[in-house]
Image (cartoon, rainbow, N blue to C red):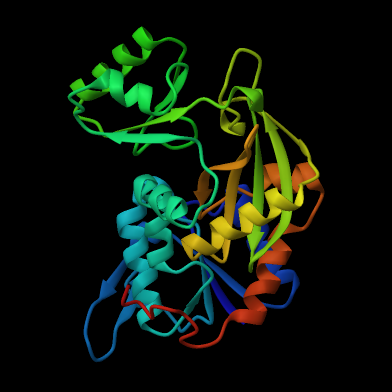
Amino acid sequence: MRIAILSRNANLYSTKRLVEAGRSRGHEVDVIDTMHCYMDITSAKPSVRYKGKRLPKYDAIIPRIGASVSFYGTAVVRQFEMTGTYSINESVAISRSRDKLRSLQLLSRKGIGMPRTGFAHHPDKIDDLIKNVGGAPVVIKLLEGTQGIGVVLADTQKAAEAIIEAFMGLNASILVQEYIKEAGGSDIRCLVVGGKVIAAMKRQAAPGEFRSNLHRGGSASLVRLSPAERKTAVDAAKTMGLNCCGVDILRSNNGPVVMEVNSSPGLEGIETATNKDVAGMIIDFIAKSAKPNNTKTKGTG
């Protein structure tokens, strides 16, 4: 097969592992910088161009699109879909998961467990917004934040009101969520591929920190999932329409709750913690699934 990995940096661990796994299985693998692609948008013969040339026909693409370039990145994925190329994650599913508000609404509609969550841009009654999610302590998140950036824990009502007012002063949209104290500063990252959890790790926040992101000094270890946790991760991936994603779950007193669904999960932490060839399993899934025009939306979503 001929596979393209859409990545801005060929030296990133995840990108290098996918290249290595693909080539070791006899596939031809190219790394293409998403932001340097440009598109010939015509009804007769849509194409993607790169470095002055029309890109060859690929059997499949693996989008590794950062949150900061979601708009252009998903447009490139959509263009590939219009040419009939298989994408492990479709453009519409990536867009759906990148919109935190939309993704939470979809998960809620499907009855998937989540922390109590409020959304606001300029609430008239800040105290009611906080009360509606169970009162302080609460977690306040910028709608556009990534890797734990723009996420604040407010211990008291006064602190929560001050933080919300500060974000409002920046004209920012925010999510206010109940704080799952019993999780103890840890979460579980489930790697879902093709409707199955192929690997899972527990991430523990550094001392004095409540965010468990590995980018923020958190540690990772192997974890055994309960059937409910496994089902929650699979259901969340299915709801987003993603064939490959990381589902972040907290263990609450009311069962597993989903914090986020990531359409471009990093592989380093989970491969290290589980000692599994996650990249290889992703390539194997693509090899089974990649057929011309084998997408739900065919670039029209």
Position of 277 relative to 1 (above/below): above
Quarter that holds the N terminus: bottom right
Position of 196 relative to 85 (above/below): above
Position of 227 relative to 287 (above/below): above
User: Residue 13, image x and y in percent?
Assistant: 63, 48
User: Residue 66, image x and y in percent?
Assistant: 43, 49
State the residue at coordinates (47%, 27%): 178
State the residue at coordinates (22%, 87%): 43
Position of 129 relative to 241 (above/below): above
Quarter that holds the C terminus: bottom left
State the residue at coordinates (38%, 78%): 297
User: Residue 253, image x and y in percent?
Assistant: 65, 32
User: Residue 175, image x and y in percent?
Assistant: 36, 33
Looking at the rendering, which quadrant does residue 42 occupy?
A: bottom left
State the residue at coordinates (28%, 72%): 39
Looking at the rendering, which quadrant does residue 94 occupy?
A: bottom left
Count every numbered label the image shows and give the total.
0
Q: Is residue 73 visible?
A: yes
